[in-house]
Image (cartoon, rainbow, N blue to C red):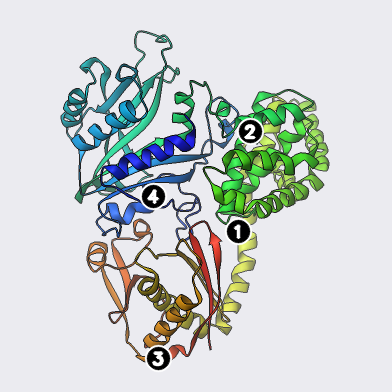
């Protein structure tokens, strides 16, 4: 079974069980500075798990594009991926444990045809915060899993939360038994020997955790996640994801082109190329900070490993073609954006190639100096210089060092990096202060205009519209929002008219402070509720708009002048961008 078939089966199955299919959010959550990437299907749904009404109902299903970066250095082994697709289904205060487990069991055994004997499951053992999960235990027994294959574990294994604070709860996890022998008498699904492979995680989210501990959410939710690549690998009887159709053609092409054989390098190239493409496709560009830096690291590491295999870098364009061709059934947008994706990757490769050789020479000098002096750790100043002068991400220097039996002191590097950053920030602060003093009024107007535009788009296009990002200067505003199609001229005109009507009505802009719960109750628009504190600032513009926002705003909409849309274009998959001015 191919990945696309598994995805389609999943979405259709949950659709047949009353779920609405919703689109994947971008891998870069554009309005949420607290995380660099979307790491799980639940992430874009947090406001709804907390009680906000979702326009598509209380049963949702989707595939979510995810990037997890904590394991970048592990890529190259037989299982780690930085990009992966998570299939998920959600109950927002609708069904709970029994129904969720019955559906999972039905999907695995009937739709995918996995024999029940191949499945083991784990449930939460209970502690002072939450009772033992007997309900899941009974539900699994009822479904057809015998007691001896139902295991109980504590919070380390059977509790799920994204980070330190947020909605959370006990989970039940499903494992596929590969048929390998147990590595010891104690071998069970919590063992990492490879006999048991985790395939699906159903989280029963009825708690909220913050610094004061756990409290009950208003509603009992279900949040599930199934890794597509891993499931495809198991369904195809493969040992690693690199053997499935999404990666195998690139692996083969690299083998054909290489002059030196190294399977780790082939995996790194194949994996980092796909992650890089998915990030670029959703608007990421290589830079020295945030997600741009991760993208840069991925692309530079890929380039170094292409070099290591002795592959002619002129072939990169063909390698990208092979990768896009293997992925385009799942992500047709890669095919659409093929030229742009290539351009970004090849430009970054060229940039890096200019300094790679000199950098490698510099590294060799540094390494041999360290060895001569009998040191095992490379001088941190040299690591910093390799980054500043040759564009070597420190993690790459660390990898090179490891190949020479040397180390990098990363915490010392971070200290030095901060020191430099602090110096340049002091300079920036000066600049920033100057900038703010001379402007302000126009930005404030544009700020209020984004709220009106957001509201008008909802009226004209539908409630699925949400802000995905914005950028304001004294001259214009840019507004990104979720919407699947190009806007027609008529739609643009209607939106413009509505905004100008709101302006003419000269509505009072009220600043209110209230608890997060109250804001949710009032239906305030907020994409990233979880990052706000308990008391939030809400701006209410009559009956037109109510949004969580830090301000500043004008006092009355009449102050804005005339609103005009200059351009409407694609920003990334499922996200449109409007450029507009106030005249
Ligand atoms: N949030 C859970 C996970 O990431 C289930 O989707 O595993």
What residue does disc 3 label? 558
* Quarter residue 510 falls in: bottom left
Q: Is residue 101 above or below residue 234?
A: below
At a point 68% along the width and 42% down the height, the residue shown is 320
Discs 3, 4 touching: Cβ within 8 Å: no
Discs 3, 2 touching: Cβ within 8 Å: no
Could you tell me how far apart the alpha carbons at marks 2 and 1 are, in whole angstroms?
A: 34 Å
Q: Is residue 67 above or below residue 52?
A: above
Place of residue 430 in the rendered image (x, y in percent of width and height, measured from the top left): 61, 72
Along the polypeptide, which appears first: circle 2 or circle 1?
A: 2
Closer-to-camera residue (40/128): 40
Place of residue 485 in the rendered image (x, y in percent of width and height, measured from the top left): 48, 63
**Which element type, helix, strand or loop, lies under badge 4?**
helix
Could you tell me how far apart the alpha carbons at marks 1 and 3 are, in whole angstroms?
A: 42 Å
Mark seen at residue 43: 4
What residue does disc 2 label? 268
Nearest to the eye among marks 2 and 1: give it.
2
Could you tell me how far apart the alpha carbons at marks 2 and 4 are, in whole angstroms?
A: 27 Å
Along the polypeptide, which appears first: circle 3 or circle 4?
A: 4
């Amino acid at each position: 079974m191919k990945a696309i078939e598994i995805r389609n089966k999943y979405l259709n199955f949950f659709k047949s069980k009353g779920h609405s299919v919703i689109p994947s959010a971008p891998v870069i959550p554009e309005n949420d500075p607290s995380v660099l990437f979307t790491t799980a299907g639940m992430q874009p749904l947090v406001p709804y798990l907390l009680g906000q009404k979702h326009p598509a109902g209380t049963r949702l299903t989707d595939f979510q594009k995810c990037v997890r970066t904590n394991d970048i250095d592990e890529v190259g082994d037989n299982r780690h991926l930085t990009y992966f697709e998570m299939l998920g289904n959600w109950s927002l205060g609708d069904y709970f444990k029994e129904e969720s487990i019955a559906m999972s069991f039905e999907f695995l055994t009937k739709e995918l045809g996995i024999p029940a004997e191949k499945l083991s499951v784990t449930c939460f053992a209970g502690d002072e915060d939450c009772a033992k999960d007997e309900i899941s235990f009974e539900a699994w027994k009822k479904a057809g899993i015998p007691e001896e294959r139902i295991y109980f574990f504590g919070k380390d294994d059977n509790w799920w939360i994204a980070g330190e604070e947020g909605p959370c709860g006990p989970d039940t996890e499903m494992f596929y038994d590969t048929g390998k022998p147990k590595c010891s008498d104690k071998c069970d699904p919590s063992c990492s020997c490879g006999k048991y492979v985790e395939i699906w995680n159903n989280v029963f989210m009825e708690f909220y955790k913050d610094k004061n501990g756990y409290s009950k959410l208003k509603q009992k939710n279900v949040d599930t996640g199934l890794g597509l690549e891993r499931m495809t690998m198991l369904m195809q009887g493969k040992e690693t994801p690199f053997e499935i159709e999404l990666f195998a053609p690139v692996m083969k092409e690299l083998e054909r082109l290489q002059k030196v054989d190294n399977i780790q390098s082939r995996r790194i190239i194949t994996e980092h190329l796909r992650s890089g493409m998915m990030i670029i496709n959703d608007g990421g560009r290589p830079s020295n900070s945030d997600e741009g830096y991760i993208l840069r690291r991925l692309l530079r590491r890929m380039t170094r490993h292409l070099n290591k295999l002795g592959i002619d870098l002129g072939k990169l364009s063909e390698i990208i073609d092979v990768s896009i061709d293997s992925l385009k059934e799942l992500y047709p947008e890669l095919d659409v954006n093929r030229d742009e994706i290539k351009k970004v990757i090849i430009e970054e490769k060229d940039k890096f190639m200019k300094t790679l050789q000199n950098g490698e020479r510099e590294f060799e000098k540094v390494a041999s100096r360290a060895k001569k002096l009998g040191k095992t750790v490379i001088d941190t100043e040299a690591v910093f210089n390799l980054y500043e002068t040759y564009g070597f991400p420190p993690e790459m220097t660390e990898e090179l060092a490891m190949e020479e039996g040397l180390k990098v002191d990363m915490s010392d590097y971070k200290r030095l990096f901060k020191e430099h950053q602090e110096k340049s920030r002091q300079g920036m602060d000066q600049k920033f202060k100057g900038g703010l003093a001379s402007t302000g009024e126009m930005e404030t107007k544009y700020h209020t205009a984004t709220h009106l535009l957001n509201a008008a788009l909802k009226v004209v296009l539908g409630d699925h519209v949400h802000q995905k990002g914005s950028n304001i200067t004294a001259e214009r505003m840019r507004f990104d929002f979720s919407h699947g199609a190009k806007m027609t001229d008529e739609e643009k005109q209607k939106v413009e008219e509505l905004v100008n009507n709101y302006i003419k009505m000269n509505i009072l802009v009220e600043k209110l402070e209230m608890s997060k719960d109250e804001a949710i109750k009032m239906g305030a628009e907020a994409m990233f509720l979880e990052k706000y504190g308990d008391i939030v600032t809400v701006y209410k513009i009559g009956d037109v708009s109510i949004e969580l926002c830090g301000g500043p705003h004008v006092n009355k909409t009449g102050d804005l002048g005339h609103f005009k849309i200059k351009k409407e274009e694609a920003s990334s998959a499922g996200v449109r961008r409007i450029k507009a001015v106030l005249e």
